[in-house]
Image (spheres, rainbow, N blue to C red):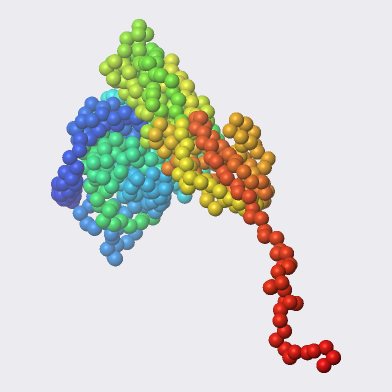
Amino acid sequence: MAAHIGRRLRKQAATTAVAAAAVAALSASQAPGVTVDDQGGRSTGDATSAPDAAADDSATGNSPYYTDLPPLNSPSPSPSAGAGDRRAAEAGIPATVLDAYKKAEAALREKKPGCNLPWQLLAAIGKVESGQARGGRVTADGTTVTPILGPQLDGNGFALIRDTDNGAYDGNRMYDQAVGPMQFIPSTWEWAGRDGNGDGREDPNNIYDAALAAGHYLCRFGWDLSDQGDLRKAILSYNNSTDYLNTVLSWLEYYRKGTHEIPDGTGSLPADRSDDTARPGASPSTPRTTPPTRPGDTRPGKPSGSRPAPGPAAPGNGGSDSPNTPPTTPPPTTPPTPTDTVHHLEDAGTGTLTAMAGHTFAERISTRAETETGKAVAKVRIRFTIVGDTDATFAGGESVATVTTDTSGVAVAPALRAGERTGAFAVQAAVAGRSVKGVPYRATVTERAADALVRTGPEELTSVAGGEFAEPVEVKATYRGAAAGKVAVTATLVTSADDPAENDEGPYFKDADGRTVRTLTGLRTDADGLLTLPKLYADDTAGTFLLRLTTAGGATLTVELTVEPAATPSPDPEPSTDPSTDPSTEPSTGPSQTPGA
Protein backbone atom coordinates (compact mmCIF):
# COMPACT_ATOMS: atom_id res chain seq x y z
CA MET A 1 0.00 0.00 0.00
CA ALA A 2 2.83 2.39 0.90
CA ALA A 3 4.45 1.79 -2.47
CA HIS A 4 1.16 2.46 -4.23
CA ILE A 5 0.61 5.71 -2.30
CA GLY A 6 4.17 6.78 -3.07
CA ARG A 7 3.64 6.18 -6.75
CA ARG A 8 0.47 8.25 -6.77
CA LEU A 9 2.23 11.10 -4.96
CA ARG A 10 5.03 11.05 -7.50
CA LYS A 11 2.49 11.06 -10.32
CA GLN A 12 0.69 14.04 -8.78
CA ALA A 13 3.97 15.94 -8.59
CA ALA A 14 4.73 15.09 -12.20
CA THR A 15 1.23 16.09 -13.24
CA THR A 16 1.56 19.49 -11.60
CA ALA A 17 4.98 20.18 -13.09
CA VAL A 18 4.20 19.11 -16.63
CA ALA A 19 0.77 20.69 -16.72
CA ALA A 20 2.35 23.99 -15.69
CA ALA A 21 4.82 23.65 -18.55
CA ALA A 22 2.03 22.88 -20.98
CA VAL A 23 0.03 25.93 -19.88
CA ALA A 24 3.12 28.09 -20.30
CA ALA A 25 3.60 26.74 -23.81
CA LEU A 26 0.00 27.47 -24.69
CA SER A 27 0.31 31.07 -23.59
CA ALA A 28 2.63 31.67 -26.53
CA SER A 29 -0.44 31.85 -28.77
CA GLN A 30 -3.43 34.02 -27.97
CA ALA A 31 -5.35 33.09 -31.09
CA PRO A 32 -8.80 31.64 -30.46
CA GLY A 33 -9.15 27.96 -31.16
CA VAL A 34 -11.55 26.24 -33.47
CA THR A 35 -13.69 23.19 -33.39
CA VAL A 36 -13.41 21.11 -36.48
CA ASP A 37 -15.46 18.42 -38.11
CA ASP A 38 -14.12 15.58 -40.29
CA GLN A 39 -12.75 17.85 -42.95
CA GLY A 40 -14.59 20.94 -43.92
CA GLY A 41 -16.27 22.96 -41.18
CA ARG A 42 -14.71 25.03 -38.45
CA SER A 43 -16.19 27.51 -36.02
CA THR A 44 -14.27 30.13 -34.15
CA GLY A 45 -14.39 30.28 -30.40
CA ASP A 46 -12.33 29.42 -27.35
CA ALA A 47 -11.09 25.92 -28.08
CA THR A 48 -9.87 25.37 -24.56
CA SER A 49 -13.43 25.46 -23.30
CA ALA A 50 -14.27 22.33 -25.33
CA PRO A 51 -17.62 23.72 -26.56
CA ASP A 52 -20.61 21.60 -27.47
CA ALA A 53 -19.11 20.34 -30.71
CA ALA A 54 -20.37 16.99 -31.92
CA ALA A 55 -18.18 14.20 -30.61
CA ASP A 56 -17.75 12.66 -34.04
CA ASP A 57 -16.34 15.95 -35.28
CA SER A 58 -12.98 14.64 -34.05
CA ALA A 59 -10.73 11.81 -35.18
CA THR A 60 -11.53 9.77 -32.08
CA GLY A 61 -15.10 10.82 -31.39
CA ASN A 62 -13.68 12.28 -28.18
CA SER A 63 -13.15 8.74 -26.93
CA PRO A 64 -11.36 8.07 -23.63
CA TYR A 65 -7.59 8.35 -23.59
CA TYR A 66 -4.70 7.56 -21.26
CA THR A 67 -4.00 10.40 -18.83
CA ASP A 68 -0.61 9.22 -17.53
CA LEU A 69 1.97 12.00 -17.77
CA PRO A 70 5.65 11.59 -18.62
CA PRO A 71 8.05 10.43 -15.91
CA LEU A 72 10.27 13.00 -14.27
CA ASN A 73 13.43 11.14 -15.23
CA SER A 74 15.26 11.78 -18.52
CA PRO A 75 13.80 10.26 -21.69
CA SER A 76 17.17 8.62 -22.36
CA PRO A 77 17.93 5.56 -20.20
CA SER A 78 20.99 5.43 -17.96
CA PRO A 79 23.93 3.33 -19.19
CA SER A 80 23.06 0.66 -16.65
CA ALA A 81 19.38 0.39 -17.62
CA GLY A 82 18.50 -3.05 -18.91
CA ALA A 83 15.80 -4.20 -21.27
CA GLY A 84 13.51 -4.97 -18.36
CA ASP A 85 13.98 -1.65 -16.60
CA ARG A 86 10.50 -0.22 -15.92
CA ARG A 87 11.57 3.40 -16.37
CA ALA A 88 13.30 2.61 -19.67
CA ALA A 89 10.19 0.82 -20.93
CA GLU A 90 7.96 3.71 -19.90
CA ALA A 91 10.14 6.31 -21.64
CA GLY A 92 11.08 4.28 -24.72
CA ILE A 93 9.12 3.68 -27.92
CA PRO A 94 8.83 0.18 -29.43
CA ALA A 95 10.99 -0.23 -32.55
CA THR A 96 8.25 -0.86 -35.13
CA VAL A 97 6.01 1.85 -33.70
CA LEU A 98 8.87 4.38 -33.73
CA ASP A 99 9.68 3.43 -37.33
CA ALA A 100 6.05 4.02 -38.33
CA TYR A 101 6.06 7.51 -36.81
CA LYS A 102 9.28 8.48 -38.55
CA LYS A 103 8.10 7.12 -41.92
CA ALA A 104 4.87 9.09 -41.60
CA GLU A 105 6.86 12.26 -40.87
CA ALA A 106 9.01 11.66 -43.98
CA ALA A 107 5.92 11.10 -46.15
CA LEU A 108 4.26 14.30 -44.93
CA ARG A 109 7.50 16.24 -45.42
CA GLU A 110 7.22 15.34 -49.11
CA LYS A 111 3.44 15.62 -49.57
CA LYS A 112 2.73 18.61 -47.30
CA PRO A 113 6.05 20.28 -46.48
CA GLY A 114 4.35 23.39 -45.12
CA CYS A 115 2.76 21.36 -42.32
CA ASN A 116 6.10 20.74 -40.53
CA LEU A 117 4.75 17.62 -38.81
CA PRO A 118 7.19 16.27 -36.17
CA TRP A 119 7.16 12.52 -35.57
CA GLN A 120 7.25 13.31 -31.85
CA LEU A 121 3.67 14.63 -32.14
CA LEU A 122 2.51 11.30 -33.57
CA ALA A 123 4.38 9.55 -30.74
CA ALA A 124 2.68 11.77 -28.16
CA ILE A 125 -0.78 11.04 -29.59
CA GLY A 126 0.04 7.34 -29.94
CA LYS A 127 1.09 7.24 -26.28
CA VAL A 128 -2.09 8.93 -25.10
CA GLU A 129 -4.41 6.95 -27.38
CA SER A 130 -3.09 3.40 -27.00
CA GLY A 131 0.13 3.38 -24.98
CA GLN A 132 2.16 3.03 -28.23
CA ALA A 133 0.02 0.17 -29.59
CA ARG A 134 -0.10 -1.50 -26.16
CA GLY A 135 3.61 -1.32 -25.63
CA GLY A 136 4.45 -2.29 -29.22
CA ARG A 137 2.51 -5.54 -29.35
CA VAL A 138 2.52 -5.61 -33.14
CA THR A 139 3.48 -8.06 -35.85
CA ALA A 140 6.40 -7.56 -38.23
CA ASP A 141 4.24 -5.57 -40.68
CA GLY A 142 2.98 -3.25 -37.91
CA THR A 143 -0.43 -4.81 -37.28
CA THR A 144 -1.52 -5.01 -33.65
CA VAL A 145 -1.54 -8.56 -32.32
CA THR A 146 -5.15 -8.02 -31.29
CA PRO A 147 -7.37 -5.16 -32.48
CA ILE A 148 -7.54 -2.14 -30.18
CA LEU A 149 -11.11 -0.99 -29.55
CA GLY A 150 -12.40 1.90 -27.50
CA PRO A 151 -15.70 1.70 -25.62
CA GLN A 152 -18.90 1.81 -27.62
CA LEU A 153 -20.05 5.40 -28.03
CA ASP A 154 -23.63 4.88 -26.92
CA GLY A 155 -24.19 8.15 -25.06
CA ASN A 156 -24.12 6.39 -21.68
CA GLY A 157 -21.12 8.06 -20.05
CA PHE A 158 -19.59 8.68 -23.48
CA ALA A 159 -20.48 10.47 -26.69
CA LEU A 160 -23.39 9.16 -28.72
CA ILE A 161 -22.32 8.01 -32.19
CA ARG A 162 -24.59 5.44 -33.75
CA ASP A 163 -23.06 2.88 -36.09
CA THR A 164 -21.71 4.38 -39.33
CA ASP A 165 -19.86 1.38 -40.83
CA ASN A 166 -22.26 -1.53 -40.24
CA GLY A 167 -19.63 -3.00 -37.96
CA ALA A 168 -16.98 -3.19 -40.68
CA TYR A 169 -14.14 -1.75 -38.60
CA ASP A 170 -15.24 -2.17 -34.99
CA GLY A 171 -17.48 -5.24 -35.19
CA ASN A 172 -20.34 -3.21 -33.70
CA ARG A 173 -23.49 -2.68 -35.75
CA MET A 174 -25.20 -0.63 -33.06
CA TYR A 175 -22.70 2.07 -32.05
CA ASP A 176 -19.29 3.20 -33.24
CA GLN A 177 -16.08 2.48 -31.35
CA ALA A 178 -12.64 4.02 -31.84
CA VAL A 179 -10.30 1.59 -33.57
CA GLY A 180 -6.56 0.93 -33.66
CA PRO A 181 -3.41 2.39 -32.10
CA MET A 182 -4.39 5.94 -33.13
CA GLN A 183 -8.07 5.39 -32.18
CA PHE A 184 -9.93 6.56 -35.28
CA ILE A 185 -13.71 6.26 -35.28
CA PRO A 186 -14.99 4.39 -38.36
CA SER A 187 -16.64 7.41 -40.01
CA THR A 188 -13.35 9.33 -39.90
CA TRP A 189 -11.19 6.39 -40.95
CA GLU A 190 -13.40 5.88 -44.00
CA TRP A 191 -12.03 9.08 -45.56
CA ALA A 192 -8.80 9.60 -43.59
CA GLY A 193 -7.41 6.05 -43.85
CA ARG A 194 -4.07 5.61 -45.62
CA ASP A 195 -1.88 2.71 -46.71
CA GLY A 196 1.36 3.38 -44.85
CA ASN A 197 3.15 0.07 -45.35
CA GLY A 198 2.42 -0.43 -49.05
CA ASP A 199 0.43 -3.66 -48.75
CA GLY A 200 -2.58 -2.31 -50.64
CA ARG A 201 -4.78 -2.13 -47.53
CA GLU A 202 -5.90 0.70 -45.26
CA ASP A 203 -6.07 -0.94 -41.85
CA PRO A 204 -6.75 1.17 -38.73
CA ASN A 205 -5.10 -1.57 -36.64
CA ASN A 206 -1.82 -1.26 -38.54
CA ILE A 207 0.52 1.28 -36.96
CA TYR A 208 2.04 2.31 -40.32
CA ASP A 209 -1.41 2.95 -41.82
CA ALA A 210 -2.73 4.63 -38.67
CA ALA A 211 0.32 6.87 -38.18
CA LEU A 212 0.22 8.09 -41.80
CA ALA A 213 -3.53 8.71 -41.54
CA ALA A 214 -3.03 10.66 -38.31
CA GLY A 215 -0.33 12.75 -39.98
CA HIS A 216 -2.61 13.68 -42.88
CA TYR A 217 -5.45 14.39 -40.45
CA LEU A 218 -3.30 16.76 -38.41
CA CYS A 219 -2.00 18.52 -41.56
CA ARG A 220 -5.33 19.36 -43.15
CA PHE A 221 -6.62 22.96 -43.46
CA GLY A 222 -3.08 24.07 -44.34
CA TRP A 223 -2.06 24.09 -40.66
CA ASP A 224 1.61 24.73 -39.89
CA LEU A 225 2.41 22.65 -36.82
CA SER A 226 5.54 24.66 -36.09
CA ASP A 227 3.11 27.46 -35.18
CA GLN A 228 1.83 27.04 -31.62
CA GLY A 229 -1.67 28.19 -32.51
CA ASP A 230 -2.04 25.75 -35.41
CA LEU A 231 -0.51 22.95 -33.32
CA ARG A 232 -3.10 23.55 -30.64
CA LYS A 233 -5.98 23.53 -33.16
CA ALA A 234 -4.74 20.30 -34.72
CA ILE A 235 -4.51 18.47 -31.39
CA LEU A 236 -7.95 19.69 -30.31
CA SER A 237 -9.38 18.50 -33.63
CA TYR A 238 -8.16 15.02 -32.73
CA ASN A 239 -9.92 15.03 -29.35
CA ASN A 240 -11.71 18.19 -28.27
CA SER A 241 -10.62 18.35 -24.63
CA THR A 242 -8.36 20.76 -22.77
CA ASP A 243 -7.01 17.95 -20.59
CA TYR A 244 -6.27 15.93 -23.71
CA LEU A 245 -4.45 18.90 -25.26
CA ASN A 246 -2.27 19.38 -22.17
CA THR A 247 -1.49 15.67 -21.91
CA VAL A 248 -0.42 15.42 -25.55
CA LEU A 249 1.67 18.58 -25.27
CA SER A 250 3.45 17.20 -22.20
CA TRP A 251 4.43 14.00 -24.04
CA LEU A 252 5.41 15.99 -27.12
CA GLU A 253 7.80 18.08 -25.04
CA TYR A 254 9.13 14.95 -23.35
CA TYR A 255 9.86 13.14 -26.63
CA ARG A 256 11.45 16.24 -28.12
CA LYS A 257 14.07 16.09 -25.37
CA GLY A 258 15.08 12.67 -26.65
CA THR A 259 13.86 9.11 -26.57
CA HIS A 260 15.16 5.65 -27.27
CA GLU A 261 14.07 2.53 -29.08
CA ILE A 262 12.97 -0.53 -27.15
CA PRO A 263 12.07 -4.01 -28.47
CA ASP A 264 8.53 -4.56 -29.70
CA GLY A 265 6.22 -5.81 -26.97
CA THR A 266 8.34 -4.56 -24.07
CA GLY A 267 6.68 -1.18 -23.59
CA SER A 268 4.58 -0.54 -20.53
CA LEU A 269 0.85 0.11 -20.84
CA PRO A 270 -0.33 3.32 -19.12
CA ALA A 271 -2.45 2.75 -16.01
CA ASP A 272 -4.91 5.63 -15.91
CA ARG A 273 -7.55 6.61 -18.44
CA SER A 274 -9.92 9.52 -18.68
CA ASP A 275 -12.95 7.24 -18.29
CA ASP A 276 -11.78 5.46 -15.14
CA THR A 277 -14.70 6.97 -13.21
CA ALA A 278 -17.17 7.30 -16.09
CA ARG A 279 -18.99 4.07 -15.30
CA PRO A 280 -18.72 2.57 -11.83
CA GLY A 281 -17.67 -1.06 -11.95
CA ALA A 282 -16.19 -0.91 -15.46
CA SER A 283 -12.57 -1.70 -16.13
CA PRO A 284 -11.82 0.48 -19.13
CA SER A 285 -8.05 0.16 -18.83
CA THR A 286 -7.93 -3.60 -19.25
CA PRO A 287 -6.77 -5.08 -22.58
CA ARG A 288 -9.53 -5.82 -25.02
CA THR A 289 -10.31 -9.09 -26.73
CA THR A 290 -10.20 -9.69 -30.44
CA PRO A 291 -13.49 -9.62 -32.36
CA PRO A 292 -13.92 -12.73 -34.49
CA THR A 293 -12.79 -12.35 -38.08
CA ARG A 294 -14.50 -13.43 -41.25
CA PRO A 295 -13.41 -16.66 -42.94
CA GLY A 296 -10.33 -16.08 -45.04
CA ASP A 297 -9.32 -12.88 -43.26
CA THR A 298 -5.73 -12.68 -42.10
CA ARG A 299 -6.22 -9.40 -40.26
CA PRO A 300 -8.85 -6.70 -39.97
CA GLY A 301 -8.86 -3.70 -42.23
CA LYS A 302 -10.08 -2.91 -45.68
CA PRO A 303 -8.57 -3.38 -49.10
CA SER A 304 -7.43 -0.09 -50.58
CA GLY A 305 -10.34 1.59 -52.27
CA SER A 306 -13.11 -0.56 -50.79
CA ARG A 307 -14.91 -0.98 -47.50
CA PRO A 308 -14.57 -4.38 -45.76
CA ALA A 309 -17.60 -6.54 -45.23
CA PRO A 310 -19.46 -6.04 -41.96
CA GLY A 311 -18.15 -7.87 -38.92
CA PRO A 312 -20.23 -9.24 -36.06
CA ALA A 313 -21.88 -6.95 -33.57
CA ALA A 314 -19.94 -6.11 -30.41
CA PRO A 315 -22.02 -4.40 -27.77
CA GLY A 316 -19.08 -3.45 -25.53
CA ASN A 317 -19.32 -2.55 -21.87
CA GLY A 318 -17.90 0.91 -21.62
CA GLY A 319 -14.25 0.16 -22.26
CA SER A 320 -13.67 -3.34 -20.91
CA ASP A 321 -14.05 -6.13 -23.41
CA SER A 322 -16.85 -8.60 -23.50
CA PRO A 323 -17.41 -11.57 -25.82
CA ASN A 324 -18.84 -10.57 -29.15
CA THR A 325 -22.29 -12.03 -28.56
CA PRO A 326 -25.66 -10.39 -29.15
CA PRO A 327 -26.71 -8.13 -26.26
CA THR A 328 -28.93 -9.76 -23.70
CA THR A 329 -30.58 -6.47 -22.76
CA PRO A 330 -31.98 -3.84 -25.12
CA PRO A 331 -29.82 -0.77 -25.69
CA PRO A 332 -30.55 2.28 -23.55
CA THR A 333 -33.33 4.48 -24.79
CA THR A 334 -32.04 7.80 -26.02
CA PRO A 335 -33.93 10.74 -27.47
CA PRO A 336 -33.67 11.17 -31.25
CA THR A 337 -30.78 13.29 -32.45
CA PRO A 338 -31.18 15.91 -35.19
CA THR A 339 -29.65 13.38 -37.57
CA ASP A 340 -32.45 10.91 -36.76
CA THR A 341 -35.08 13.42 -37.92
CA VAL A 342 -33.60 14.03 -41.39
CA HIS A 343 -35.76 12.58 -44.15
CA HIS A 344 -33.93 13.89 -47.20
CA LEU A 345 -31.47 16.45 -48.51
CA GLU A 346 -32.22 19.23 -50.98
CA ASP A 347 -30.01 21.51 -53.04
CA ALA A 348 -29.86 24.95 -51.41
CA GLY A 349 -29.36 27.09 -54.52
CA THR A 350 -26.01 25.86 -55.81
CA GLY A 351 -25.13 27.45 -59.15
CA THR A 352 -23.21 26.03 -62.08
CA LEU A 353 -20.01 24.32 -60.95
CA THR A 354 -17.38 25.09 -63.59
CA ALA A 355 -13.75 26.03 -63.15
CA MET A 356 -10.60 26.16 -65.21
CA ALA A 357 -7.90 23.58 -64.45
CA GLY A 358 -5.81 24.68 -61.49
CA HIS A 359 -8.35 27.28 -60.37
CA THR A 360 -10.82 27.41 -57.49
CA PHE A 361 -14.52 27.01 -58.28
CA ALA A 362 -16.25 30.34 -57.75
CA GLU A 363 -19.48 28.59 -56.72
CA ARG A 364 -19.71 26.55 -53.51
CA ILE A 365 -22.05 23.62 -52.95
CA SER A 366 -24.95 24.28 -50.57
CA THR A 367 -27.19 21.51 -49.25
CA ARG A 368 -30.22 21.68 -46.95
CA ALA A 369 -31.28 18.95 -44.52
CA GLU A 370 -35.06 18.60 -44.13
CA THR A 371 -37.61 16.52 -42.28
CA GLU A 372 -40.31 14.66 -44.16
CA THR A 373 -42.51 17.76 -43.93
CA GLY A 374 -39.78 20.01 -45.32
CA LYS A 375 -38.68 21.57 -42.04
CA ALA A 376 -35.00 22.55 -41.79
CA VAL A 377 -32.79 20.46 -39.49
CA ALA A 378 -29.82 22.13 -37.82
CA LYS A 379 -26.71 20.47 -36.33
CA VAL A 380 -26.64 17.66 -38.87
CA ARG A 381 -23.33 16.54 -40.35
CA ILE A 382 -23.37 16.52 -44.15
CA ARG A 383 -20.60 14.62 -45.88
CA PHE A 384 -19.54 15.85 -49.35
CA THR A 385 -17.61 13.26 -51.36
CA ILE A 386 -15.89 13.87 -54.70
CA VAL A 387 -16.66 11.02 -57.08
CA GLY A 388 -15.28 10.22 -60.53
CA ASP A 389 -12.08 10.34 -62.54
CA THR A 390 -10.75 13.65 -61.30
CA ASP A 391 -7.93 15.17 -59.29
CA ALA A 392 -10.12 17.98 -57.96
CA THR A 393 -10.10 18.37 -54.18
CA PHE A 394 -11.63 20.38 -51.40
CA ALA A 395 -9.58 22.96 -49.52
CA GLY A 396 -6.91 21.07 -47.62
CA GLY A 397 -6.33 18.58 -50.41
CA GLU A 398 -8.90 15.96 -49.40
CA SER A 399 -11.67 14.34 -51.43
CA VAL A 400 -14.15 14.28 -48.53
CA ALA A 401 -15.43 17.17 -46.43
CA THR A 402 -17.96 17.10 -43.60
CA VAL A 403 -19.86 20.23 -42.58
CA THR A 404 -22.54 20.74 -39.93
CA THR A 405 -25.79 22.39 -40.99
CA ASP A 406 -26.56 25.84 -39.59
CA THR A 407 -29.81 27.04 -38.04
CA SER A 408 -31.41 27.19 -41.49
CA GLY A 409 -30.50 23.56 -42.10
CA VAL A 410 -27.88 24.48 -44.73
CA ALA A 411 -24.35 23.12 -44.98
CA VAL A 412 -21.96 24.90 -47.35
CA ALA A 413 -19.09 22.74 -48.57
CA PRO A 414 -15.53 24.07 -48.60
CA ALA A 415 -14.41 25.56 -51.89
CA LEU A 416 -13.60 23.07 -54.61
CA ARG A 417 -10.25 23.39 -56.34
CA ALA A 418 -9.82 21.98 -59.84
CA GLY A 419 -6.80 19.84 -60.62
CA GLU A 420 -5.19 19.46 -64.03
CA ARG A 421 -7.53 16.72 -65.25
CA THR A 422 -10.31 18.17 -67.39
CA GLY A 423 -13.84 16.84 -67.74
CA ALA A 424 -16.87 16.19 -65.55
CA PHE A 425 -17.06 14.66 -62.10
CA ALA A 426 -19.63 14.51 -59.28
CA VAL A 427 -19.88 15.60 -55.67
CA GLN A 428 -22.27 13.52 -53.58
CA ALA A 429 -23.90 15.09 -50.53
CA ALA A 430 -25.12 12.64 -47.87
CA VAL A 431 -26.01 12.62 -44.18
CA ALA A 432 -23.13 11.26 -42.13
CA GLY A 433 -24.27 8.16 -40.28
CA ARG A 434 -27.61 7.71 -42.05
CA SER A 435 -28.86 6.35 -45.34
CA VAL A 436 -31.30 8.94 -46.64
CA LYS A 437 -31.84 10.50 -50.02
CA GLY A 438 -28.78 12.58 -50.87
CA VAL A 439 -28.03 15.12 -53.56
CA PRO A 440 -25.58 14.64 -56.46
CA TYR A 441 -23.86 17.68 -57.96
CA ARG A 442 -22.17 17.80 -61.36
CA ALA A 443 -18.95 19.76 -61.72
CA THR A 444 -16.82 20.42 -64.78
CA VAL A 445 -13.14 21.28 -65.15
CA THR A 446 -12.23 23.06 -68.38
CA GLU A 447 -8.84 23.44 -70.01
CA ARG A 448 -6.59 26.25 -68.85
CA ALA A 449 -7.20 29.30 -71.01
CA ALA A 450 -5.90 32.77 -71.81
CA ASP A 451 -7.82 35.76 -73.14
CA ALA A 452 -4.76 37.80 -74.20
CA LEU A 453 -1.31 37.22 -75.71
CA VAL A 454 1.37 39.89 -75.99
CA ARG A 455 4.93 39.99 -77.29
CA THR A 456 7.68 40.43 -74.71
CA GLY A 457 10.78 40.16 -76.93
CA PRO A 458 12.32 42.48 -79.56
CA GLU A 459 9.84 44.17 -81.89
CA GLU A 460 11.57 43.28 -85.18
CA LEU A 461 12.27 39.68 -86.06
CA THR A 462 14.44 39.38 -89.17
CA SER A 463 16.62 36.87 -90.93
CA VAL A 464 18.35 36.59 -94.27
CA ALA A 465 17.16 33.95 -96.71
CA GLY A 466 18.75 30.60 -95.92
CA GLY A 467 19.73 31.76 -92.45
CA GLU A 468 18.15 31.75 -89.00
CA PHE A 469 16.44 34.33 -86.81
CA ALA A 470 18.79 35.69 -84.17
CA GLU A 471 16.04 36.33 -81.62
CA PRO A 472 13.34 33.83 -80.52
CA VAL A 473 9.65 34.68 -80.32
CA GLU A 474 8.70 35.45 -76.71
CA VAL A 475 5.10 35.98 -75.51
CA LYS A 476 3.08 36.29 -72.31
CA ALA A 477 -0.43 34.90 -71.79
CA THR A 478 -2.91 36.46 -69.37
CA TYR A 479 -6.44 35.69 -68.23
CA ARG A 480 -8.53 38.57 -66.89
CA GLY A 481 -5.35 40.53 -66.38
CA ALA A 482 -3.51 37.84 -64.39
CA ALA A 483 -0.71 35.62 -65.68
CA ALA A 484 -2.13 32.50 -67.33
CA GLY A 485 0.21 29.68 -66.40
CA LYS A 486 0.30 26.21 -67.99
CA VAL A 487 -1.87 27.30 -70.92
CA ALA A 488 -1.59 25.28 -74.14
CA VAL A 489 -0.41 27.30 -77.16
CA THR A 490 -0.37 26.42 -80.87
CA ALA A 491 2.06 28.19 -83.23
CA THR A 492 1.42 28.11 -87.00
CA LEU A 493 3.21 29.85 -89.87
CA VAL A 494 0.11 30.85 -91.83
CA THR A 495 -0.31 31.67 -95.51
CA SER A 496 -1.74 35.16 -94.91
CA ALA A 497 -3.73 37.26 -92.47
CA ASP A 498 -6.95 36.03 -94.12
CA ASP A 499 -5.84 32.46 -94.77
CA PRO A 500 -4.98 30.45 -91.62
CA ALA A 501 -3.72 27.52 -93.67
CA GLU A 502 -0.15 26.47 -93.04
CA ASN A 503 2.36 28.15 -95.34
CA ASP A 504 4.54 25.95 -97.52
CA GLU A 505 7.43 28.39 -97.83
CA GLY A 506 9.28 30.95 -95.75
CA PRO A 507 10.28 30.61 -92.06
CA TYR A 508 10.05 27.24 -90.36
CA PHE A 509 10.87 25.33 -87.15
CA LYS A 510 12.78 22.07 -86.91
CA ASP A 511 11.68 18.88 -85.19
CA ALA A 512 13.97 16.62 -83.18
CA ASP A 513 15.22 15.01 -86.41
CA GLY A 514 15.99 18.35 -88.09
CA ARG A 515 13.03 18.19 -90.46
CA THR A 516 11.03 21.27 -91.46
CA VAL A 517 7.92 21.96 -89.30
CA ARG A 518 5.59 24.93 -89.71
CA THR A 519 3.02 24.09 -86.99
CA LEU A 520 3.90 23.47 -83.33
CA THR A 521 1.42 21.99 -80.84
CA GLY A 522 1.91 21.02 -77.21
CA LEU A 523 3.53 24.31 -76.28
CA ARG A 524 2.63 25.52 -72.79
CA THR A 525 3.26 28.71 -70.86
CA ASP A 526 5.19 28.54 -67.59
CA ALA A 527 3.78 29.42 -64.17
CA ASP A 528 4.19 33.13 -64.96
CA GLY A 529 2.37 32.84 -68.29
CA LEU A 530 5.60 33.20 -70.32
CA LEU A 531 6.55 31.18 -73.39
CA THR A 532 9.67 31.22 -75.55
CA LEU A 533 9.28 29.46 -78.90
CA PRO A 534 11.99 27.27 -80.43
CA LYS A 535 14.46 28.78 -82.91
CA LEU A 536 13.11 29.88 -86.30
CA TYR A 537 14.90 29.29 -89.59
CA ALA A 538 14.42 30.84 -93.07
CA ASP A 539 14.43 29.07 -96.43
CA ASP A 540 15.55 30.78 -99.65
CA THR A 541 12.29 32.75 -100.03
CA ALA A 542 12.49 36.44 -99.11
CA GLY A 543 9.51 38.50 -97.99
CA THR A 544 7.22 39.17 -95.05
CA PHE A 545 5.60 36.19 -93.34
CA LEU A 546 3.15 35.67 -90.46
CA LEU A 547 3.35 33.47 -87.35
CA ARG A 548 0.00 32.99 -85.61
CA LEU A 549 -0.25 31.93 -81.93
CA THR A 550 -3.58 30.72 -80.49
CA THR A 551 -4.71 29.46 -77.06
CA ALA A 552 -7.76 27.89 -75.46
CA GLY A 553 -10.00 30.75 -74.44
CA GLY A 554 -9.65 32.61 -77.70
CA ALA A 555 -6.41 34.53 -77.29
CA THR A 556 -4.67 35.11 -80.64
CA LEU A 557 -1.45 36.89 -81.55
CA THR A 558 0.01 37.37 -85.05
CA VAL A 559 3.74 38.01 -85.28
CA GLU A 560 5.38 39.49 -88.40
CA LEU A 561 8.60 37.85 -89.63
CA THR A 562 10.87 39.46 -92.23
CA VAL A 563 13.21 37.49 -94.48
CA GLU A 564 15.67 39.63 -96.40
CA PRO A 565 17.25 38.52 -99.68
CA ALA A 566 20.67 36.98 -99.41
CA ALA A 567 23.53 39.31 -100.49
CA THR A 568 24.45 39.01 -104.27
CA PRO A 569 28.19 38.27 -104.77
CA SER A 570 30.18 40.92 -106.82
CA PRO A 571 31.18 39.81 -110.44
CA ASP A 572 34.92 39.53 -111.44
CA PRO A 573 36.38 42.88 -112.84
CA GLU A 574 36.82 43.30 -116.72
CA PRO A 575 40.38 43.72 -118.15
CA SER A 576 41.36 47.41 -118.37
CA THR A 577 41.97 49.16 -121.81
CA ASP A 578 43.47 52.34 -120.41
CA PRO A 579 46.98 52.77 -121.92
CA SER A 580 48.13 54.41 -118.78
CA THR A 581 47.45 51.21 -116.90
CA ASP A 582 48.56 48.76 -119.64
CA PRO A 583 51.86 47.30 -118.61
CA SER A 584 52.80 46.75 -122.26
CA THR A 585 52.82 50.50 -122.94
CA GLU A 586 54.91 51.51 -119.99
CA PRO A 587 58.32 53.13 -120.93
CA SER A 588 61.32 50.89 -120.61
CA THR A 589 63.79 51.58 -117.86
CA GLY A 590 66.53 49.35 -119.36
CA PRO A 591 69.36 50.32 -121.76
CA SER A 592 68.32 51.83 -125.01
CA GLN A 593 68.60 49.55 -127.95
CA THR A 594 68.64 50.80 -131.51
CA PRO A 595 67.75 48.44 -134.33
CA GLY A 596 70.88 47.24 -136.01
CA ALA A 597 73.03 48.47 -133.21
In the image, farthest residue toward the top? 373
Instruction: Locate residue 1, reporting x and y percent.
Output: 17, 47
Closest to the observer: 525 or 391? 525
Residue shown at 36% from the left, 56% from the top: 262
Image-based side of 549 in relation to 288, left or right? right
Closest to the observer: 318 or 524? 524
Q: Quadrant of the C terminus?
A: bottom right
Looking at the image, how many numbered discs can be counted on the residues?
A: 0
Q: Is residue 3 above or below residue 577?
A: above
Instruction: Locate residue 314, reporting x and y percent.
Output: 40, 28
In the image, farthest residue toward the right? 596
Image-based side of 519 in relation to 183, left or right? right
Residue shown at 17% from the left, 40% from the top: 30
Q: Is residue 165 above or below residue 144?
A: above
- Residue 523: name its quadrant: top right
Residue shown at 42% from the left, 48% from the top: 110
Residue shown at 28% from the left, 60% from the top: 77
Instruction: Locate residue 495, reporting x and y percent.
Output: 63, 36
- Residue 65: name its quadrant: top left
Image-based side of 235 in relation to 462, left or right? left
Closest to the observer: 320 or 585? 585
Closest to the observer: 420 or 121? 420
**Would you say residue 86 is visible in this rendering?**
no
